[in-house]
Amino acid sequence: MTVRARKRFGQHFLHDKNVITRIINQINLQPAQTMVEIGPGTGALTFPLLEQVAKLHAIEIDRDLAQLLQTRVPADRLTIHCVDVLKFEFCKHFESRLNVVGNLPYNISTPLIFHLLDQASCIDQMIFMLQKEVAERICAEPGSNEYGRLSIMVQSQCQVEWLFNVSADSFSPPPKVESAVIKLYPGKHTCSSIKDRKLFNELVRTAFSKRRKTIRNALKSLVPEQILLDSGITLSSRPEELPVETYINLANALQQVRQS
């Protein structure tokens, strides 16, 4: 069966064995964890993973690819969930803790990261191949051009680690962008004490919807100026200059004022 990448699924099939080996070497699966692969494609990562684990779950939206993989691996070793991963409820489906890996489709990588953050309570580790630009935004430091809402939302819930870059010729067909592999550890961040995550999300979204303005003007519709001053924030600061911890403290202060 000839396999062709489908643009509507953002498919670029990884074939570089060195990259595959480096990803596999980063996985530290514990006995009580379930291994889940997102977007197995033609099985470049799937088959090396099956050499490491007795049972693997894979989420693949392409029915032809799912069928092809299932004909090559017994169902008691590989369970394929042929669904849209953006609608897949990880924590409801699995009873054990999860170790998630995948070469994420570039066209849905950012919404998929947010979807996984909403379910981070059941995930211990995530290793992802991403468009390099998205990986840079996730790992960005305050004050950099890449630092923004995605950086804060991920870093507020996860310890992030940049692993290595991947060239376009490691894929078939080669994408028009470079890639990178990163590792995320949900729940292992020192700033995970967010009292009201919905409010925190609203605060960060509001700040970066007007990132060219000062933090005072960007948040004036949401946060009283006195709360900014009490939080030790310089009113002329730009949203991208404030570290993750400051946004967490500010959201918590705002929540406390609203409750009083």
Image: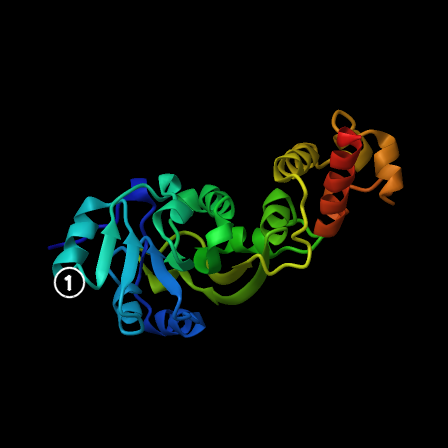
> Relative to residue 196, is residue 38 drawn left or right?
left
In the image, 133 versus 52, the foreground residue is 52
Residue 204 seen in the figure: yes
- The residue under the point 38% across, 43% down is 89
Residue 188 occupies which quadrant of the picture? bottom right
Q: Secondary structure at mark 1?
A: loop
> Relative to residue 255, is residue 192 drawn left or right?
left
Q: Please say if 224 is above or below 88.
A: above
> Relative to residue 93, is residue 231 drawn left or right?
right
- The residue under the point 31% across, 73% down is 52
Q: Looking at the figure, which quarter contains the C terminus? A: top right
Count residues near mark 1 (Cα–Cα under 10 Å), then give few for <14, some for 14-19, many for 20+: few
- The residue under the point 27% across, 74% down is 51
Q: How far from the left and from the top, in percent, is residue 108? A: 42, 43
Which residue matches tag 1? 74
Colour setup of the view: rainbow
